[in-house]
Image (cartoon, rainbow, N blue to C red):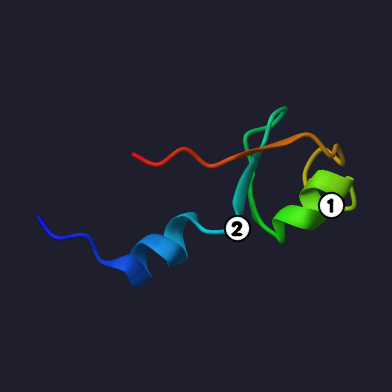
Amino acid sequence: MAKIIEASNRLYKNVFVCRNCKTKIKSDPQKILKGKVRCRKCKRNAFRPLRKK
C-alpha cells in the first residue's frame, strides 16, 4: 500500500497530545517547546508528539 504524503502530513504534522488528559491539539512545535501553548481542557502545557500508527 502506497503512502500518501499529503494525507500523512495532514494527520500527523504539528499534532500534539496532552500528557494529562490525552487531548489532541495542532500547534507550531516551537510554541510547544517554549511552553506558550496550553491545553484547552485541563489548562496544562505538557505535550508529546502524536504517535504514528
Which tag, 2 or 1, sits closer to the chain's start? Answer: 2
* For residue 19, side relative to residue 36 (left or right): left
Residue type, mark 2 in image: Asn
As drawn, 21 above or below 11 = above
Position of residue 11 measured from the top left corner of the image (x, y, whole percent) = 44, 59
Q: Rate crowding at label 2 as few (under 14), some (14 to 19) or many (20 or more) other CA atoms within 10 Å.
A: some
Determine whether label 2 and label 1 are within 8 Å by CB.
no
Could you say which is closer to the camera, residue 53 or residue 22?
A: 53
Q: Which residue is mark 1?
A: 37
Residue type, mark 1 in image: Val
Disc 1 is placed on an element classified as: loop
Q: Which residue is mark 2?
A: 14
As drawn, 37 above or below 2 = above
Position of residue 3 measured from the top left corner of the image (x, y, whole percent) = 22, 60
Q: Is residue 9 visible?
A: yes
Give the quarter of the figure containing the N terminus: bottom left
As drawn, 6 above or below 28 = below
Disc 2 is placed on an element classified as: loop
Which residue is the extreme one toward the bottom?
A: 6
* For residue 40, side relative to residue 34 (left or right): left
Q: Is residue 40 visible?
A: no
Residue in view at x 69 percent, y 29 percent: 19
Could you say which is closer to the camera, residue 43 or residue 15?
A: 15
* For residue 10, side relative to residue 30 (left or right): left
Position of residue 50 measured from the top left corner of the image (x, y, whole percent) = 53, 42
Residue in view at x 84 percent, y 39 percent: 45
Residue in view at x 77 percent, y 44 percent: 41
Give the quarter of the figure containing the C terminus: top left
